[in-house]
Image (cartoon, grey):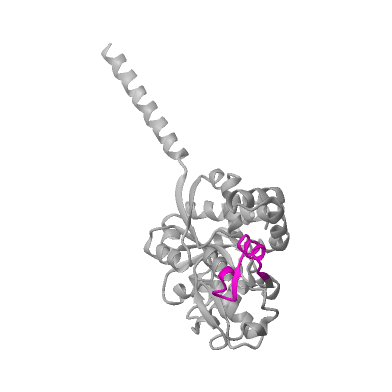
Amino acid sequence: MKITFRLFSWVTTLSLLLSFTATVQAQPVKVRAVYPSVDLQYLPAFVAQSKGIFKEEGLDVELIVMPGGRLGVQALVSGDIHFVLQLGVSLPAIWNGADLKILAQMTNRPLFSLIVRPEIQRAEDLKGKKIGVSVGATTFALVHEFLNLNGINPDKGVEYVNIPGSRGKIAALEMGLISAAPLAPPGDLKAIQAGAKRLVFFGDLMPEVSFTGLIATSRYVKEYPKTVERMVRAIVRATYVTRDDSAAALDAMQRYLKMPPDEARESYRLVRTSFNPLLNESGIKKMAALVSKSIGVTPAREPKDYLDVSFLGRALADLGKK
């Protein structure tokens, strides 16, 4: 009886341990990722949530909005979050010594338009006017470059008003506090419905520029390579789904961006071909050039020093894309 009891007890304990281990292994890894605004350039992340792609990769991803961009990078560097999805605003931090790695891409051109008040007919009309921007963000670099291309001194020819996020910019346009602002869908359509108009779609002027993607600290990449691999694969999968599956993209646009069906279809037609996960040095160099011009800082590091495409390569191989 004693031997039998001990054997039963041992088997029971072993079963419980195996059951506990299986439960632990089945638990998704909690991940926090930050993005600066709820708009179309981050659509692959929303698709990954709505289609269960993060879950399929064993991830429980919390998508967090931190307006302005720079706050998210600061939170990444401090270890409060695990990934950021905005590329351009991460570059000055990298040049200043932050040990970050760019791992994947979601869009290869800007999805923003310069939205202006009705009285602005052409670029020259912006001289001496106020433009709402998020100072330090990539959109600031876009406006800076657009003014340069149109012969307007971007440092002296206009006045910038720092307005993080799209809601404030739209309100300022409506009230006449500013004459122009860079906006992405759905904010651009909301402003247009309120009486503003689209002066230019930046994606037509600046193609093949790495605009949004996936960035983590080198330390996190080294300590949690399996989680990084899953996250990169999820973003790559979701980016392809966003580009190639219009039904999935439109569903996410209506669910996360609260866009009416007609507006969602109109915006999707404008930006669909911009979704591309294939990160390369050329696209990052173009983004670095834009950002460095706008802030007057020479890049202190080359893209090869902060690009890590090893996870991307494996993801593409897994998906038969390479």
Of 252 and 132, nearer the camera is 132
Question: Residue 112's quadrant in the figure?
Answer: bottom right
Q: Position of residue 287 (x, y in %)?
A: 58, 74
The residue positioned 54% from the left and 77% from the top of the image is 291
Residue at the image position 67 percent from the left and 77 percent from the top: 119
For this rendering, which residue is in front, 55 or 247? 247
Which quadrant is the C terminus positioned in? bottom right
87 is higher (above) or lower (below) than 258 = below
Where residue 167 sits: x, y (%)?
54, 63
Residue 277 lies in what quarter of the image? bottom right
Residue furthest out toward the front: 175
Quick check: 10 left or right of 199? left
Looking at this view, is 269 or 19 the one in front? 269
Task: Work out whether residue 285 can be spotted.
Answer: no
Q: Quadrant of the N terminus?
A: top left
Q: Position of residue 54 (x, y in %)?
A: 54, 47
Q: Residue drawn at (44%, 66%), measured in percent from left and top?
A: 73
* Vertical position of residue 277 compared to residue 198: above or below: above
Give the tally of numbered discs: 0
Quick check: 45 above or below 297?
A: above
User: What residue occupies the far top of the structure in this picture?
Assistant: 1
Give residue 17's position: percent from left, percent from top.
37, 31
Decide if residue 38 is in sight here. Answer: yes
Residue 157 lies left or right of residue 82; in this view the side is right
Nearest the viewer among 28 and 181 is 181
Q: Which residues are magenta?
A: 174-197
28 vs 148: above or below: above
- Name the quadrant containing residue 81: bottom left
